[in-house]
Image: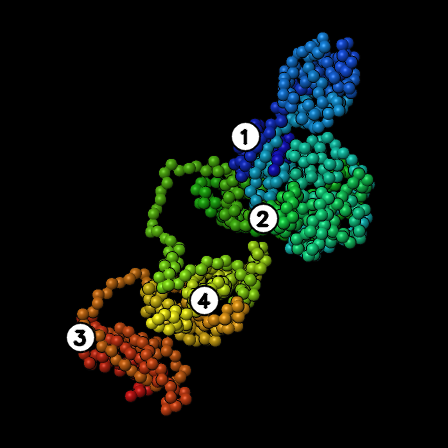
Amino acid sequence: MLLSKNWLQKYVELPESVEELDALLTDVGLEVESIEDRRDAFKNIVVGEVLTCEKHPNADKLSVCTVGDGEGEHTVVCGAPNVAAGQKVIFARVGAVMDKLGFTIDRRKLRGVESAGMICSSSELGLDENHDGIAVLPASAEPGMPLSEHLSYDDVILGIGTTPNRGDALSHIGSARDIAAVKNTPLHRPQPPALEVPDAMDFEITIEAEELCPRYSAAILEGITVQDSPDWLATALTAVGIRPINNIVDVTNYVMMEIGQPMHAFDFRQLSGNRIVVRPSAPGEQFTTLDDEKHELPDQSLLICDGEKPVALAGVMGGQNSAVSDDTTTILLESAHFNASSVRRTAKLLQMSTDSSYRFERGSDPGITVWALQRAVELIQSTCGGTVRGVYDNVAKAIDKREVSLRPAFTNRILGINIPADEQKRILEALDIEVNDEGESWRCLVPTFRSDLEREIDLVEEVARIHGYDNIPVPGRIEMHVGDGFDASAFQNRLRQLLLGFGCDEVLSSSLVPRDHAAIGEMKDRVALVQNPVSKERPALRTGMLTSLLEAVDVNIRNGHPALRVFEIGSVFAKEGENSFSEKKMLGVAITGNAVARAWNEDERPSDFHDLKGILEELLSALYLDKESIFYYDRTSTLSDQVLTLEVKGRYAGQAVEVSDAILARFGIDQPVYYAEFEIAELEAALPDRQMYRPVPRYPSVTRDLAMVLSTSVQARQIEDVVRSVNPAHLRSMRIVDVFTHESLGTDKKSVAFTMSFQAEDHTLTDEEISTAVNAVVDAAKKELGAELRI
């Protein structure tokens, strides 16, 4: 972005020196990358007047001229055929350095006549490529005026670099706003008159994609004359690197560089149907832009159309079929707000980058479209006349000021200094942020041109930026309070190492999955979609780890590796509300294929559900959670007919399933897959604070087996709960060893056998102690479960 110092000072009082301006802009985040001081150009080159012009006495093609430069008269030998008395010319005095020609002007004799200076052509100064003769200046040019001043080259051009979030700074007024805030001086904005059209033409604006074009404003002017721009306008645009074209196009570019609103002018007679339609492009649609290039448009590119055809590629470039020409008399001025992502996508895919797209990609101001029309109309009428026949504004989707709270005390705590509340308020209001003082917390309304200010900390940064980072003192001594180290990934690494030790391989995959894959499982109604996915085939975020692991299984099977034990640690996502989403870390484990390969001494054995359960039990044991966890079958799901649920310390922590054939078929897998997933946060939260060493008991253990007849509805978990609730003295372990059903027990009964191990640390247990513990378990089972001791 190029800034003209002469242009900039129309809106704000600037520092006295260029160095100060350079430092100020850089300090507020608008880094100055280049400085071109044009005031040093054309030294000793002034406006001259040819007082006399006579033929050289010794050369037919040379003339001897007398040139006045405001200070005296000089004899100059000139070879240009178009030189004549009375002309205002470009005169290089003795001592002028001609950079383009590579020499310095001095006194010299040409065919016997001494020449003290040089009458120049514009090409000899590098102004253009016109070699037809000397440059003849307007009659109003004042002899003796430095050429740089006459050409308005008495300017300094600063090239600034802006970050992608500062689209508001891509204009002279945008940059002037920051300067005014720092210097605490007024910002002078133009005040164009309102456009009142009592007899407006019938004209309609239809927006078919409000997300891509929330607002479209337009004005119709008739009776205009397309011609060259006045010098002030052409000079202003040339200074910032824009080539003047004609007064209409130049005004739209001027407004863009002034306030940051890209505009476009259409030849109204080329538009059909007295309407504008803003719509996405159709597949395969083609369009010819102003540069006479025909493009096949990416699907859903935003187009500006009349009643019959496309006339512009929204935010990027106008069309050849509606361009303003020399005989245009009526124009339609466009001033709109387009979605930044839409413009960026179209420009990148078509490999087109324009001043307009560059600004739209960084975010334009939806609140300024009508003001830009008023300003453009004011400038057009001042340069070529014209009558306004209509002003139209379609707000398809209102974009209001964002409300953000700010606590002045919080600002000071974050910055570590005391900026008075009044100064904080002044800074925010200088940046056009409306501040409503509500005591300890302010309600701030962020202007629509600052879409990057969303949180309280963003406003703190604005205060710090304008106050000046250099004004925040650096402490000579920093106190540091060092506590215990914390590594958020330590537990995940621990899980990773354990599973690798169990013979599993780790899988790393993307969180983005196909839409139908994300809907697998019980979260299908809470799938989170990405607005701008990297691949249109993967627009959704996974709701579980199963999808990623099945994709890995499928790839490995197809490449000749059917026996797998794989796991992945990653994030899963779910939609919680209209604009809210959740994210959590999950561990997924999958096994498939043979658990034991065929060998000379044993047969092959396919993996089964118990192999998966064994891995999970070993994992829990290694985490010291085996005493705190329990598996039980309790339900069916969309993943499987049977679900083995894991609870740790009474809280749901995960599940294990045999993946249903219907799901496997969607991935083209024709062999069983056993899958488990765990919520990492639940496992980590259940970890014991510390492990206690317990010496191996010196006294023997005693086991007792019991068989009880219970209802078939009683689950193993309930039996274990009863045993634990009794808390028999010296009980070390308890496990179920057999389940027996027979018609002799009844159709609704089963026999469950379990063994209990008892051991004391300080003595050998007696039969009486063991019997007391066993009887307590039997009594509790009879009372709680209706069990009968089977003899």
Q: Going from the N terminus, do you reach mark 2 or mark 4 first?
A: 2
Front residue (pair 436, 175): 175
Which quarter of the rendering shows the N terminus?
Answer: top right
**Structural distance between the alpha carbons of marks 2 and 3:** 77 Å
Res 562 label? 4
Residue 521's place in the image compared with 414, above or below, is below
Specify the amino acid type for callout 3. Answer: Thr
Name the spot of residue 146 as percent of width and height, x first: 67, 21
Task: Rate crowding at label 3 as few (under 14), some (14 to 19) or many (20 or more) other CA atoms within 10 Å.
Answer: few
Res 20 label? 1
**Structural distance between the alpha carbons of marks 4 and 1:** 70 Å
**Structural distance between the alpha carbons of marks 2 and 4:** 52 Å
Specify the amino acid type for callout 1. Answer: Glu
Specify the amino acid type for callout 4. Answer: Pro
The residue shown at (80%, 53%) is: 273
Q: Which residue is mark 2?
A: 451
Q: Which residue is mark 3?
A: 764
Specify the amino acid type for callout 2. Answer: Ser
Q: Going from the N terminus, do you reach mark 4 or mark 3 first?
A: 4
Tags 2 and 3 in contact by the CB under 8 Å rule?
Answer: no
Q: Going from the N terminus, do you reach mark 2 or mark 1 first?
A: 1
- Residue at the far front: name it: 600
**Structural distance between the alpha carbons of marks 2 and 1:** 29 Å
* Side of 275 relative to 479 (left or right): right
Name the spot of residue 521 as percent of width and height, x first: 51, 69
Q: Going from the N terminus, do you reach mark 4 or mark 1 first?
A: 1
